[in-house]
């Protein structure tokens, strides 16, 4: 389940900060995730809706799972631990 935007009610996509992997760029172009840039704000939002509203959801695990699912769908190969 993805959280919905508190401003407009649209379904959010994971918002990630930092240097994105190539798969993240591709996913962002298709609107499956959002890129927040390299600088991490102090209280970073972690979701964004198609109208570019950003908000923070406390459920970090749901965010991580969703982000990983999107990246894997684009062929991302997680590094072995
Ligand atoms: Zn919105």
Image (spheres, helix red, strand yellow):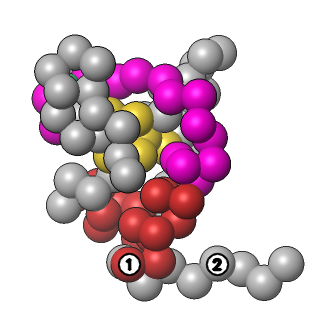
Compared to residue 51, the image places residue 50 above or below, namely below
Write the start and end of the magenta stretch as one range: 50-64
Check disc 2 and report its element: helix, strand or loop: loop
In the foreground, 22 or 65: 65
Observer able to see residue 52: no
Does 26 lie within the magenta span? no
Observer able to see residue 40: yes
Compared to residue 39, the image places residue 66 above or below, namely below
**In the displayed structure image, the side of residue 44 where residue 2 appears, left or right:** left
Query: Which quadrant does the C terminus fall into?
Result: bottom right
Alpha carbon separation for disc pair 2 and 1: 12 Å
Identified at 78% across, 84% down, the residue is 80
Q: Given the current orientation, which residue lies at the most extreme front position?
A: 1
| Quadrant assignment, res 44 | top right
**In the displayed structure image, the side of residue 9 where residue 34 appears, left or right:** right
Q: Which residue is mark 2?
A: 78
Marks 2 and 1 in Cβ contact (< 8 Å): no
Q: Is mark 1 within 8 Å of ligand 1?
A: no
Of tags 2 and 1, the one toward the viewer is 1
**In the displayed structure image, the side of residue 70 where residue 32 appears, left or right:** left
Check disc 1 and report its element: helix, strand or loop: helix
Identified at 58% across, 53% down, the residue is 64
Compared to residue 67, the image places residue 36 above or below, namely above
């Amino acid at each position: 389940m993805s959280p919905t935007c508190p401003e407009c009610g649209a379904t959010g996509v994971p918002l990630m900060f930092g240097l994105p992997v190539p798969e993240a760029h591709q996913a962002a172009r298709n609107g499956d995730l959002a890129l927040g840039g390299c600088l991490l704000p102090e209280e970073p939002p972690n979701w964004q809706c198609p109208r570019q509203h950003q908000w923070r959801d406390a459920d970090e695990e749901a965010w991580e799972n969703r982000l990983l699912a999107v990246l894997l769908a684009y062929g991302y190969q997680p590094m072995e631990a």
